[in-house]
Image (tube, rainbow, N blue to C red):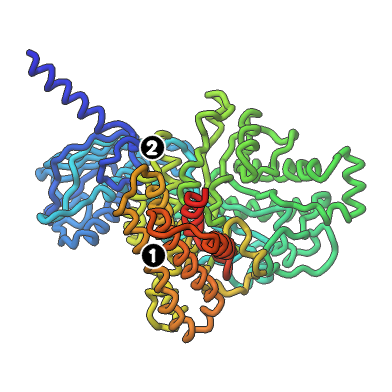
Amino acid sequence: MLNKKIVLLVFLITTLFSTIGYAQMTNSNLSLMPYPKSIQVTNSKFRLTENFSLQYILQGERLYKMSNRFLNRLAKRTGLFLKFPFANQLDKTQKPEMFIKVERIGNVKLGEDESYRLSITKDDIGIDAKTDIGVLRGLETLLQLLKADEKGYYFPVVEIEDSPRFPWRGLLIDVCRHFMPVEVIKRNIDGMAAVKMNVLHWHLSEDQGFRVESKIFPKLTELGSDGLFYTQEQIKEIIQYADDRGIRVVPEFDVPGHATAILTAYPELASAPGLYKIERNWGIFDPTLNPIIDETYEFLDKLFKEMSGLFPDEYFHIGVDENNGKQWDANKEIQKFMKDNDLADNHALQGYFNNRVLKILTKYNKKMIGWDEIFHPSMPTSIVIQSWIGKESLVDAAQKGYQVILSNGYYIDLIQPTDFHYLNDPLPMDINLSENQKKFILGVEATMWAEMISPETIDSRIWPITAAIAERLWSPQDINNVEEMYKRLETVSFELEEHGLTHIKNKGMMLRRLTNNNETNSLETLASVIEPVKIYKRNSLRKQTQQTPLTRVVDVATADAKAAREFRNLVDSFLADDKLDLRKYSQIAEQLLSWKVNYEKLEKVIAKSPILFEIRPMSENLKNISVIGLQLLNVQIGKNKLTKDLILKSNEIISLAKEPVAQTELMIVSAIEKLFKSISE
């Protein structure tokens, strides 16, 4: 009897630890992202062979496409010559190795059921879902589970129950400041689907360009796009492409500010007279639609009717952000209108504008979204507020009954590290909202603004960081172990290449171009420990425009440089040990020595490629701080003494190394500074 109790206890403990959140599953080797809500894992395996087959009953074009796309991806990953490369090739007498059970065809809209159950046994695989969109999410998890050993490819035997934490999991792509061709949008949609994101927020009008063909107002692209825009057929193609992957497409046409491109085509709608030209610089500019003339609303009515017919999603974004009000202040007629209508300030006037636009969109069965500035007491709670200012704004809006999307803390163009975004929870435990008010937080959008990106570099700014953000939005809140996230992210980043994403491979191409096709190892070594300057510092250090080349070392460098991050962690671990760890000491010393000798190697490359001249001081900084680091390390273990000269030299070199060079920052400085402080204190 006692033995039976022990066996039962062991079974219960095993079951418990196989289903708890990943934050505590530090020994798991499953590189899943987002991590499922519930998972049970065993040591058994489902072996893949050329006889693998897939069957489903419910008919639907999306289900047909997704099933065959899954089989095609599986064949490409494994090299297996599948005998049944399409779904439903078996007759009714044959049993498939994989069966999909789905209740209905889903609608690609906010709040649709995306849950699924994935069951893998030694003999077969099953996905059960309410909708085919849930099947999509399950298929992505299944592909992430694919593994290999000396016998071939297999799936581990698991039971997964999964559903998203938030219904709105989006990525904004700005195609105005720098235009992004159709293939860029498609491959990023594939990346989004791979990590279970479900909203593409497409920023389509700006000071720098209007990017959608209008057949009613053709001058918008004739005069306001430099010929870089999407035809209506291309828009439809991308919307269908996204729909096939369970992703909504929400358009944004920014008004009344950020409207230079519109006013270049139709200057009569401006709040100030004059000829307008497409803006080539970055920032907040004066041109603004005139909110008091009927012609403005007649224009928007016709344009938004046309665009509403083109974009089927029920949500429609009108921007409404960063209107500096200068043209309104200088216009006597606008000032008189405000006085006559008891509009106290520009914010009240913008509230008037918003309400008139709301009536237009409501007429076309659209729900209006805008940035924080859309909020005004006169606005009904039927609108959605996208919060970029901060969580205080988000909380305030939710408390007042407005639905909110959070983007503050998810501006991936600001070059902040992955863990910064990963730990930025939309609903932290201490948030000042009731359980009912929390329901107004629809989710999050990561924002990829396009001042400093090109089609060549955009993927490296979006991925793999956005995969970690996707997990924050899908997975349970307690799945938040940063160290484990980085481990899984390494695998997911590699897998994303399957979709044509260039975040890894373009780096080699750019390095070869920068070195004039000479050796790239030394430049790559430098690039691995530097990052572009953060926030919006890049443009302040050296003015950039729409025509500035985005082909320099700063464009190769990415946020969250892995080598620098791992070195900082190693130094932290070394300093935290009570006893001297010679293994860690050797690892730090070896790394510093390699950076020290890299200087001479890179000098030979720089001499042959003038585009690299600007980075020479950074290479020297890396050498100098590595030399100091080695000296401080030897003081730390008692091999050398801390002299006055070493203190002065350390302070000087650390201070110099903190300064940006060629709009990049050296990301190992903080680790060397910690070494120095641990000794000097």
Residue at horizontal 65 percent and vertical 44 percent from the top: 389
Residue in the foreground of this view, choosing between 388 and 264? 388
Amino acid on which disc 2 is placed: Ile
Q: Is residue 496 above or below residue 21?
A: below
Question: Could you tell me if the residues under marks 2 and 1 are in contact, i.e. CB atoms within 8 Å?
Answer: no
Asked if one can make out residue 190 in the rendered structure from this viewpoint, the answer is no
Left-right relation of 610 to 634 = right
- Which one is in front, 226 or 329? 329
Q: List x then y, in percent, for residue 474.
A: 41, 40
**Disc 2 designates what residue?**
479
Residue 627: x %, y % from top left: 45, 67
The image shows a total of numbered marks equal to 2
Q: Secondary structure at mark 2?
A: loop
Name the amino acid type tagged 1.
Answer: Ile
In this rendering, position of residue 456 left or right of residue 585: right
Per the model, the C-alpha gap separating discs 2 and 1 is 26 Å
Residue nearer the viewer, 275 or 241 = 275
What residue is rendered at 22% in x and 40% in y? 126
Q: Position of residue 8 (x, y in %)?
A: 14, 21
Q: Residue at x 69, y 60 (%)?
A: 283
Dot 2: few (<14), some (14–19), or many (≥20) neighbours within 10 Å?
many
Which of the two discs, 2 and 1, labels the residue nearer the N terminus?
2
Quadrant (top left/top right/bottom left/bottom right) for the N terminus: top left
Tell me the number on the disc at residue 504.
1
Badge 1: how crowded within 10 Å, few (<14), some, or many (20+)?
Answer: some
**Which residue does the image show at 29% across and 37% down from the upper left?**
25
- Label 1: state its secondary structure: loop
- Left of 592 or right of it: where is 44? left
Q: Name the mark on residue 630.
A: none
Between 273 and 642, the one lying in front of the other is 642
Report which quarter residue 534 is drawn in. Answer: bottom right
